[in-house]
Each structure stands twice: as C-alpha cells, then as structure tokens.
Amino acid sequence: MNARHQGTRPEHLVEGSRQELAFQVHEPDAAALERPVLLLHGFASSSRLNWSDAGWLSALADAGRRVVTVDLPGHGSSPAPDELDEYSPSRIRAELLQLLADVGVRPYRAEDPASGVDLIGYSLGARLAWEFGGAQPQLVHRMVLGGPASHDPLADFDLAAAQQFLADGTPIADRSTQELLRMAQLVPGNNMFALMSMVQAIKAEPFTPTEAVPKMPLLLVAGEQDELASTMPELARLSGRADVVWIPGRTHADVVTSRAFKKAAIAFLAS
Amino acid sequence: MSETTIAAPGRTGADPEPAAPRQLSMQQALNLALADILATDPAAVVLGEDVGTLGGVFRVTDGLQGRFGAARVFDTPLAESGILGMSVGLAMAGFHPLPEVQFDGFAYPAVNQIVCQIGRMNYRSRGTLPMPITLRVPSFGGIRAPEHHGESLEALFAHVPGLKVVSPSTPEEAYHLLRYAAARPDPVIFMEPKSRYWQKGEVSTGRRGADGDLGSRVARPGKHVTLIAWGAMVARCLQVAELAAEDGIEVEVLDLRWLKPLDAEGLAASVRRTRRAVVVHEAPLTSGLGAEVAALVTERCFDTLRAPVERVTGFDVPYPSGDLEDEYIPNIDRILFGIQRVLEYRRG
Amino acid sequence: MAELSFPLPDLGEGLIEATVLEWLVEPGEQVERNQPLVEVETTKSAVELPSPQAGKVLRTYGVPGAKVSVGEPLIVFEVADDAAGIVGTVPRDEAPKRRVRLTAVPDED
C-alpha cells in the first residue's frame, strides 16, 4: 500500500450523513499490548485542551497505552454543521461506535487484553461515556468518568438568556448559565453558534442515568471543590461497581491536569 | 503636529580596566564582549529571539538582561524581518543595535531588510543615516543540527555593497572582533562559528586597536603552501598543518577574519612567500567566497604562483542533515589532498 | 556548573499569568526533557508544562496557589558549562585522524 494513503479516513455514513468527527490515534513508543483508550472531552473544550495540554496523552503514552482522541461536533478540529441533529448525544454516540469500529476495536473478551476499549470521559464526555458504556457493554472494558454528574448541567442552561447576551449583551441572570458561557467564550476559536446548537440538542435529550446503567467497573473522579459534580455519589450508587476518588483542592476547571487523577485512572484501567 | 523623537544616549562610557588574560570559551568571550559593549556604549542595545530572559540558545547573551535591563537587552517576536527592520529604525534614531538572528538559515527572511535597507541606507541618505548595526549570526555547521542550522552565508552578504562581514576563529578573536565591529559606524555581519562556541582559549580584554582587529591574521607560519580559511575551518586547517609537518611540509594558515573587505594585501603577502594557496570553506563551491579569494590571489600573485589556487569546500547541495555533516564539511584528508595537488602541479 | 533559568512561557491568546496548581518535580531532582514539570491554571484552562531541558532542578518559583506572570522565572536548572545549546550537540574534541600522506615535490628552482 502506498504510505501516502494510510491516513485516508474511511468514508462511512452515520445515520444518513457522513461521519466527519476529527479523531487522532496516538501510538505509544513500544507497540501497545492492551486495548485502546478512547478519550472524550468536555463541553466547550477539545482534545487538545482537555487531553494534550493537560498532560494526559504523555501520561497514557508513558503507560504504554494506545489512545484515540476525538473532537465533538462544533469543537476543536471537528466540523460545526448547521443541522441540530448532528449535535444530539444519541447521534454522537452513533458516531463514536463507528469510529471505534474504524480504528479496529473488537468486542471485549475477558481472556484477551487487546480486546474491547477503555473510556475516559470528562464532564459532558463523562455523560456520553456513561450512556455509551451502558448501551455497548460488549465493547467497553472499564471507564473513568471525570467531573461527572447525575444530572447534565447543560440541560438547565438558559439558552434564551445566553442568545440574548450574545446578541446584545443583556446580562444573564442564571449563575450556572453565566459561568458555562464564560468558559465557552474564553477558548479562542470556539464556535458559539455550534456550542449553542449543542446545548439545544442536549436539552432535547437530557441525561437520564437510570436509562442505561453501565455494568462494567467504573472509576468516578472529581475535584473536592467541583460544584458541577456534586451529584457524583448518585452515579456511584446506581452503578454499584464504582470506585470514587475526590481530588483535594481541585475544581471542575483544574482537576483535569491533576497527577493524582491521571495516576488513579491509569492504575484503574490497568487492573 | 507633535513630533516624537527617540533620543539615543551618546557614546560616553569609559572602557573598564583591562583584566588579566583568562581562559574562556568562545560563547563566554562573546558574552563578555557584549557586556563590555553595553557597559561602555549607552546607545548599544541587544535584541533577538530568546536573547533576553533565556539568555540565548547558546548562552551568549546569558545574564545581560538582568544586568542591563529589558530596555537594552530584549526579546523579539519570532520574525527575523522584524528584528532587522526594528534595528534599522533604532539605528536611524541614534542607537547602536546588536541584533541576533538565532541561526544562519533564519537570516533569509530578513534578507530584504539586510540588503535593501541596512546595506544601502547610508548611501541612500547621502551619509546622513549611517547604520551602526552589528548583526550576530551563529553560523556554519558542525553541531549535528537539523536543516537551517548549519549554513554558510558569507558569500551572500559579502556580495552586498555596504555590508562588512567578519568571522572569528578563536575566543580571543571573538571578543576583540565583536568589540571592534560594534564600534563601527557601518553595518557588520558577525558570523559566529557555532561549532567553536565551547572551545576555550586565552582572552585578553580591553581594546587592541585597529591594527590588531583589521585584516587577516597568520595563525601559523609556514613556507610551502598557504591554507586560507575563516571561522571553524581555521582550527581544522591548523590540525592539517600539524599533520603536514610530519611529512615535511610547512603549511602557513591564514585566518582571513574579514570576509568583506577581503585583506588582499595580507593574502598576497602570504602567497608570495609560499607560492601555493588552498582556500577552504564549508559553503558550497560554486560562487563561494573561495572563488573571490582565488581571483584576488591570481590577480596579485600570478607570476609567483606555482599552481592554480585550489578550493576545498562543501558541495553544491543543500546543507545536509547532521548525520551526513562529516561527509560534507571539508575534512582533514580532503584538505591534505588539496595540498598535495598544489604541491604536485607542474606547468605545461 | 551554570544555571539555566526558564520563565513561564507565553501560554498564548493574550494570557499574562497563570496560577501554580502543583509542582511535579522538586529541587535536586534530575528531570528529562519533556517530563511534566508543573500544573498551572489560566483563566482559560489547566495545563501541564513539559520540561524544555534535561537537567537537575535547582529552584522552582511559585507555591501552589501563587500567580506567576508570563516571562517571570518559573524554574532554574543546573547545567554543565559545556552543555549544548537548545539545538544541536557539542562537537567532540578528537585527535585528528588522517589517511592521506603528503609527498614533498622538490621545487624546480
């Protein structure tokens, strides 16, 4: 095969339109023996901010893990389509399933350490992971959910107020909406139209963790000062197979770089 | 209309008392020279990529910002055209800029500023806007670096009217030539042989005067053949001279130092003694400075020459990656072959 | 031995300072190039800064919670006097080797 063509992405249709999410496969220095790890970033973030800049890629590479990163629609290098459907969590999960097939993930078998996939999701990525693991138990070996909540904070997002603010600067009354929008605006290059579309799509499909409870072992991690993850114990209770780690002193924004978080996640996935 | 002028201070500082000669590496000697220039010339400013807080990728500007402040030693954006463009403006405002281009291969983006502004401003302004700029360029190869980090630009700049070009070969030469260059009213391209940065040698401080700083320098006397070199090739030619002596051949090594203007008299004087000349440089052969040297020697010593001037140079290819560098840079055997050819040559 | 100081790098997008979250190395420790040094948080995000240099850590600046401005010292390494620059290697000092021998040819006069 001509080496030039090895990077060509396979063309697939997902729910009738082309799968176009930007993804990258990061190989460790020595050939990975274990199943790949799929990383799912949070709202208004990207694979680069959430995983690369925060040191996860190098930590996982040092642990010898093969890693797949993917940018959610309207985030990072992924396209920002106009259609609202493209942002819905169910559509994103379908894309993720196709992506894992494309990168060669095979169904999990207990006797084969290379089979299946591990997931690490942060914030919105943790919600997507919960649902994905619940729906695809045949693929997922273990999952680490960072800064998770039993209730998606984006579902309470005051979209009308946010759009008003973006249009003419009218102050937003709701503190959580205000804070989410502030974080979204801090990242240069963030496409505000796409982010608002995603919020709208999430409001149409709010998170109901009881709908599909993942059966595999989980590690739940959040900063002690993470207000958005205050309902994490509820997820642990639902799972019944979850280890819970609280990182002292950290918030929803800064727990992502925590060495303790990375160490706990890597050790948990290796066991 | 209000007019804003930037006033550069006059040249008032007194030179520090010369210290006893000491052992310094070339990077330390250059660092000391820059410190002495900044201390004695209030109009001098050092600018470039990473020259300030980092102290230079080769430590040449180490500690200067701490000692002289960020107004006189400052970091610039990663834009060579900007570094040299800013130097033109500073020079017009009365400053004496000492810009650094971090590596030879990154001087190309600034060629417009160097050739069309720095080289010509004095001429264009009928002498009212001299360009007292000393552009330091870590130059030549020998450190196993990637592309853009091993090039020899002397022929390019020597060809430009209005520029002077100089390259030191030892820590002592580095200190004194940099101080001399910085005190000139004309722009000087100062090519630092980066493979020699770590070599130590005795350095005397203070000033040695134009007699010591101008022209070429006989680095080793000999009577059978003159090896002509500059920068890092001087040290290699001295090694060759040592080996040639084992075979009974006395090689004179002429360190050209100034590549523009070339020391025609010094060249002629040496070759009249030895009657044979081999010029050695890292740059590619074609239209290299060796061609100019060969022409000068031939014009002035045609009757005494026993053989055509031999050139031992790099090849007419882009500077290779680090692993191939030893195949590219003239090595001892290639220089010895060059000597053998001029020794063997017979007319007719 | 020489000291080599690195400032807090420009974290891009007009950010002028960062808050130290946690140091991952300590004075006296030998670190590799690209080894994670410190976690810092900006108004934008939290990042892990890799080491620009291999060497022994002499000093670090900023306890957890402290703000450091871009360009201010962050870490100081101890490096050998003859340490290479950031690009390339230090040429080795080797005895000259030769294969070519010169044969002296007597002059005609």
Image (cartoon, coloured by chain):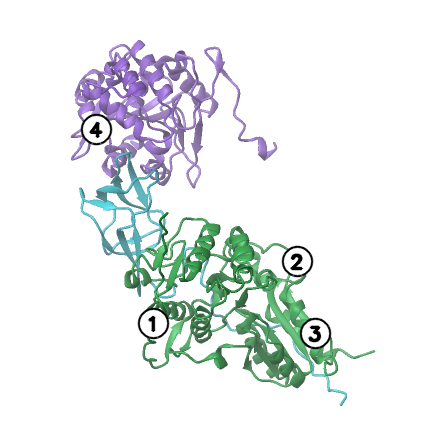
Chain colours: A purple, B green, C cyan
Q: From this view, report whether residue B137 is shown above or below residue C33.
A: below
Measured Cα–Cα span from mark 3 to mark 1: 47 Å
Which numbered disc, 2 or 4, marks the residue closer to the eye?
Answer: 2
Q: Secondary structure at mark 3?
A: loop
| Label 2: element kind | loop
The answer to whether residue A137 shows anywhere in this view is no
Query: Of residues C105 and B11, which is closer to you in this image?
Result: B11
Kind of residue sitting beneath label 3 = Val
Which residue does the numbered mark 4 point to in the structure image? Answer: A222
Q: CA distance from mark 3 to mark 2?
A: 19 Å
Residue B129 appearing in the image: yes
Q: Are marks 2 and 1 on the same chain?
A: yes
| Type of amino acid under label 2 | Asp
Q: Give coordinates of residue C63: x percent, y percent.
A: 18, 47
Pointer 3 residue: B309
Q: Residues within 10 Å of mark 4 (few under 14, many from 20)?
A: many
Sequence-first disc among 3 and 2 = 3
Q: Residues within 10 Å of mark 1 (few under 14, many from 20)?
A: few
**Number of the front mark, 2 or 1:** 1
Seen in the picture, residue A54 relative to C105 is either above or below; the reply is above
Farthest residue to the front: give it: B1
